[in-house]
């Protein structure tokens, strides 16, 4: 079960270290296998892709069956509830609205004889990976697809392993609702490689986004540079900061919701109140009993769960900044006033009625967030991830003449005489 | 020598393929060595760092001598010319001005019962790699350091291998001029690993930027995820589009200036005029004679140089978009009018008085640009590279109640009952 660590008597570096070192994708055996899959798909294209699909997913595909048909999409609508359709429409509206605010514009400065600026353009083609099997997340389709749409990406290609059951209907409906038309029934490292290099049936893309198992994650990382990728994602985590005003029932529920994701997920409470700590522990044990994924939750809490008691809020925020959690809940009074002290987190949930699952689905902000401490330097997925910039520069003859000497001095300081020459020949 | 390919008679895919496949950092032997260096430095820290520095750079460092002293900086100023100091001041002014325009602000939307937005924060600590040896580029210090400064990064750590001569004085002056105080005399994969994990003498950073040889490039790529990196950089390239109005002398000089960087560099002319093509070829041969780095230039032009003649401008831009060059020069009349058709390029230089070397030093736009076709998805280095975002979300009790049903529906569609529970317990 989840343990209480009383940091008021001294900081326990052991537990902090354990949280820091959770999963670094360092599995050499799988990495080697992934490399083999990649070079095979790169060379033998569709042939290798279909062989691996048969090997791993147990289905026989060819060029004529690999793509999801309009018929299949129509059927998917029949399998989902009317309530889901309503919920997804609301989610699309909110997510679109939030991401519209991230759009950036081309800017230019016109001076006398000089023009410069930065041109913003959408990426042309993007691939979205959507996991199959038990973990079929329609919300993931929205969170990856909508920012790409808002950015103006021309072509979005989705891949998802189907197994024998076909792609999850909720996922298909989500994709159709946001206008994704090219959906392919492939997954794993082979699908990632197909997107990176293109095959006879899968279009080559410029960037691959979306979550996946370790094969997918390692393939994405290995192909970074051939294509762009969203981020190197690890297992999910939440850190709740709670003071004595927090409701232990709510806090417990939020820790549990994170823990159900994965036995590697991490749920951490940092509180200034020993009483809250103890109550949350009791509540966790109580609520866990009626949850479906109890087994995963138990393991996850035991592995990477922790309740940490601190002397004051400042200490608590220090721990949060050190861990740099994917999700940070501020379950304290006057939470807004301390946000300036939060340095590292993927997303901050403020107040006791903003539980993390609200952000997973339909509030609007993206749920694709940096994990495993990478919030120190990575950002949530956003429209910015689906655009690129080009610098632009114009000098008139007079303007160039004015800086002629300086450019030549610089070029010579670097020993690059052909650089100096390119200025000299013009005068 | 550079060859003319007449695409008016049909496109030569061979040459396009050759340009596409230039260098992909696929050197397994070096990659393995780099891995070994990384894990050694990660474990044995300073000890390993100093051992490798002795082995590769031939100098014996310890904790007391690894850092550049104020004295050494003072001495560097004595070795550089007054003209260089003037040129660098101008460059700093222009580069700062350009990058100030890239700053983004935290935004928030306050609605009834709902607040959301995105918080922008600078990265805390950033490492800049500056190559040593013959290729000592003070401009590189400015182009990597100034955006970090403008973003508000608290601590910038610079590393550069010194060999026995000490760090190049131009580089030291450039670093000092922009206020970089922590400079360490180490380089190679060992320096990159030291920055990623921290050692007794080198501070751990959140992101590593800057160019380097293949050891440095592979170390950066291997550590991506532990830290962020700027990009996976390949050798440099320029593509000049010229019409019949272009001055062959200028075009030739610009192609030569690119070629002098590296035998792997690529200089491509795409022109609608066979006459210009022929004149440029002649000019290249003429101008090359008096250039210091003639030997490198000859190899580079032979390896990856090309003069391509096309039927019309549209075809030419198509080739440019396909190659996605780091630098694109539009040496044509009314160049501004076709910029909307340019899809893929790191930086666009407009008109005949905007040669690429102008952008290398002091016009303002960043010279750290995506290479080897990665302009399809990567962007020039910018202030954005030194900030990160955090999503923020607040819902009041009433607002949460309003979406309660939808969140629960979504959670259930994904089989995540603990997610649904975290909403339910609140009502």
Image (cartoon, coloured by chain):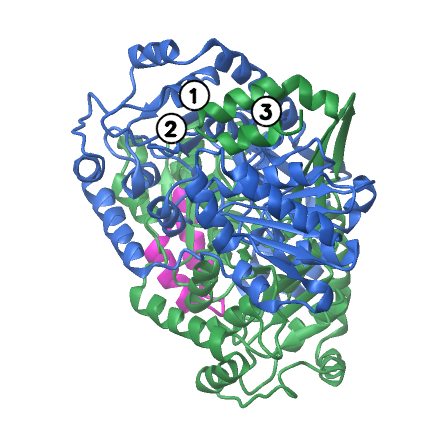
Chain colours: A blue, B green
- How far apart are the two marked residues, 3 and 2, measured between alpha carbons? 21 Å
Q: Which mark is residue A158?
A: 2
Closer to the chain start, of discs 3 and 1, is 1
Q: In the rendering, at what x and y percent does residue A301 appear? A: 51, 50
The magenta region covers B276-305
Residue B238 or residue A134, whichever sits in front: A134
Q: Residue at x 75, y 39 (%)?
A: B106
Residue of label 1:
A175
Q: Is residue A213 left or right of residue B135?
A: left
**Circle 3 SS class:** loop
Rendered image quadrant of residue A151: top right
**Circle 1 SS class:** helix
Q: Is residue B277 magenta?
A: yes
Q: In the rendering, at what x and y percent does residue B131 appear? A: 54, 70
Where, quadrant-wise, is the C terminus of chain B in this rendering?
top right
Closer to the chain start, of discs 2 and 1, is 2
Q: Is residue A351 above or below residue A177?
A: below
């Amino acid at each position: 079960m989840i343990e209480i660590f009383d940091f008021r008597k001294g900081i326990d570096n052991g537990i902090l270290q354990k949280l820091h070192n959770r999963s670094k994708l360092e599995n050499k055996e799988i990495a080697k296998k992934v490399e083999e899959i990649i070079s095979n798909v790169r060379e033998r294209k569709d042939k290798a892709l279909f062989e691996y699909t048969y090997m791993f997913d147990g289905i026989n595909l060819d060029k004529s069956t690999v793509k999801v048909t309009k018929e299949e999409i129509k059927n998917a609508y029949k399998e989902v509830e009317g309530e889901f359709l309503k919920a997804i429409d609301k989610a699309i509206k909110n997510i679109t609205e939030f991401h519209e605010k991230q759009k950036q514009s081309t800017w230019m400065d016109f001076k006398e004889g000089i023009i410069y600026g930065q041109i913003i353009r959408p990426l042309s083609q993007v691939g979205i990976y959507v996991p199959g099997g038990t973990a079929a997340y329609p919300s993931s389709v929205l969170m990856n697809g909508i920012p790409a749409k808002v950015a103006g990406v021309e072509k979005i290609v989705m891949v998802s392993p189907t197994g024998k059951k076909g792609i999850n209907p909720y996922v298909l409906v989500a994709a159709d609702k946001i206008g994704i038309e090219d959906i392919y029934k492939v997954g794993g490292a082979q699908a990632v490689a197909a997107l990176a290099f293109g095959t006879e049936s899968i279009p080559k893309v410029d960037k691959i986004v979306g979550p996946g198992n370790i094969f997918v994650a390692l393939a994405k990382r290995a192909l970074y540079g051939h294509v762009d990728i969203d981020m190197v994602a690890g297992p999910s985590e939440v850190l709740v900061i709670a003071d004595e005003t927090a409701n232990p029932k709510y806090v417990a529920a939020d820790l549990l919701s994170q823990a159900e994701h994965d036995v590697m997920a991490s749920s951490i409470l940092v509180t200034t109140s020993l009483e809250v700590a103890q109550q949350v522990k009791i509540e966790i044990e109580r609520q866990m009993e009626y949850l479906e994924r109890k087994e995963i939750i138990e393991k996850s809490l035991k592995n990477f769960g922790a309740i940490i008691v601190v002397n004051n809020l400042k200490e608590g925020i220090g721990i949060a900044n050190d861990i740099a959690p994917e999700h940070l809940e501020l379950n304290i009074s006057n939470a807004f006033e301390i946000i300036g002290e939060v340095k590292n987190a993927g997303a901050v949930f403020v107040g006791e009625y903003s539980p993390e699952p609200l952000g997973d689905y339909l509030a609007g902000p993206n749920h694709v967030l940096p994990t495993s401490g990478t919030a120190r330097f990575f950002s949530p997925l956003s429209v910015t991830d689906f655009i690129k910039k080009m610098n632009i520069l114009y000098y008139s003859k007079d303007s160039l003449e004015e800086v002629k000497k300086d450019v030549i001095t610089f070029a010579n300081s670097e020993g690059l005489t052909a650089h100096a020459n390119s200025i000299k020949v013009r005068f």
